[in-house]
Image (cartoon, rainbow, N blue to C red):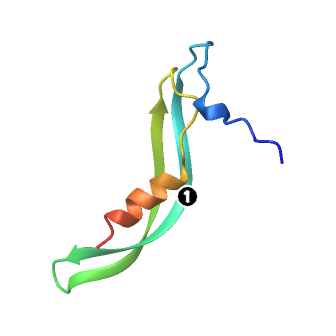
Amino acid sequence: MKDKLDLQSLSDDRKVKIDKVGVKNIRYPIIVEDRTNNIQNTIAELDIYVELPHQHRGTHMSRFIEILNKFHK
């Protein structure tokens, strides 16, 4: 089996910055504090983006969700 070339690890000589790259319309269960009931369960609708500097070829968008899950309490 031939090894696949990892394009993200290569340098990009074009020097083009991407202003916004990410994941849209994530529905994620959260708990928020409520003045009368103390807590309230709801669904957040999230858009998660990063700026991609010209020296980076891409981002691992699955890590956005990993980070979100890491801070879920």
Q: Locate residue 35 relative to residue 27 in the image: left or right.
A: left
Is residue 24 shown above or below 6?
Answer: below
Is residue 27 shown above or below 8?
Answer: below
Specify the quadrant of the image occupied by residue 38. Answer: bottom left
Q: Which residue lies furthest to the front in this view?
A: 1
Q: Which residue is drawn at 45% across and 38% down?
A: 50
Q: Locate residue 18 relative to residue 67 in the image: left or right.
A: right
* Viewer-proximal residue among 73 and 37: 73
Q: What residue type is labelled 1?
A: Asn
Q: Which residue lies furthest to the bottom in this view?
A: 37
* Viewer-proximal residue among 72 and 25: 72
Q: Residue at x 46, y 32 (%)?
A: 51
Q: Locate residue 55 relative to residue 10 in the image: left or right.
A: left
Q: Position of residue 25 (x, y in %)?
A: 55, 58
* Viewer-proximal residue among 58 and 9: 9
Is residue 37 shown above or below 19?
Answer: below
Q: Locate residue 53 relative to residue 57 in the image: left or right.
A: left
Q: Residue at x 47, y 59 (%)?
A: 65
Specify the quadrant of the image occupied by residue 8. Answer: top right
Q: Position of residue 46 (x, y in %)?
A: 46, 57
Q: Where is residue 64 in the image (x, y as percent from the top left)?
A: 46, 53
Q: Position of residue 12 (x, y in %)?
A: 61, 19
Circle 1: is it few (<14), some (14-19), or many (20+) Cα within 10 Å? Answer: few
Q: Which residue is drawn at 48% across and 53% down?
A: 63
* Secondary structure category for the residue under label 1: strand
Task: Identify residue for label 1.
Answer: 25
Q: In which quarter of the image is the C terminus?
A: bottom left
* Viewer-proximal residue among 29 and 2: 2
